Amino acid sequence: RAGAMGARSPIMRAVIAAARAGTPVLGICNGFQLLTETGLLPGALMRNAGLTFVCRDVFLRVTQPDSLFTSRYAQDQVIRIPVAHHDGNYFADPETLARLEGEGSVAFRYCDRTGVVGGSANPNGSINDIAGIFDPARKVLGLMPHPERLADPALGGTDGQAMFNSLVECLS
């Protein structure tokens, strides 16, 4: 499983302790895999549905702007963020999925450029088109897309910048 070896790395004990103490933790791509493998976030990340590496820009709909990571986004805002993964297919059992949905813990969903969720907009087959989730306190966020790759005009866009600005603003 993706992240299984890294989750047992000695540094992860400190990350888990920090998260449990309320320190914000952001896991992007392989970091999201680590967060699920350590149990800081529920579910698992499996091989993409097409069994291929996916590297392209995708669109995400912000489904939960009420967090220290997403406060600079609007509800249902559509943002463009790149993905680059082979094991990004998020899966959770029905009970866990119902809990995530009920708690408002789904942060982002894959969508098309107009915000419509589903179909070919989902690059990896993730259940319910989930691209990122929070822990119940919304202090741990895991997502497969790479906001850091579109956080400066020199990189071709700034849609990811709001995530980091949100974090800085909330921690200031």
Image: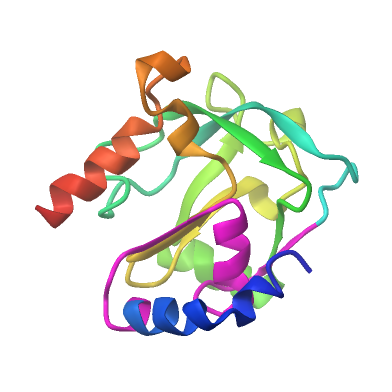
Q: Residue at left 42%, top 76%?
A: 15
> What x and y, as percent, mark residue 157?
43, 18
140 on left or right of 112: left
State the residue in front, 126 or 25: 25
**Residue bounds of the magenta highlight:** 19-46
Give the answer, above or below, for where 43 lies relative to 147. Answer: below
The image's colouring method is rainbow
Give the answer, above or below, for where 19 lies relative to 115. Answer: below
Q: Residue at left 9%, top 52%?
A: 172
Residue reaching furthest front?
10
State the residue in front, 4 or 61: 4
> What x and y, as percent, mark residue 136?
39, 72
133 on left or right of 154: right
Q: Tell me the quarter of the picture where residue 95 sits.
A: bottom right
Q: Tell me the quarter of the picture where residue 148 sits.
A: top left
Residue reaching furthest left?
172
Give the answer, above or below, for where 167 lies relative to 84. Answer: below
67 on left or right of 9: left
State the residue in front, 127 or 164: 164
> What x and y, as percent, mark residue 16?
43, 81
Q: Residue at left 81%, top 48%?
A: 48
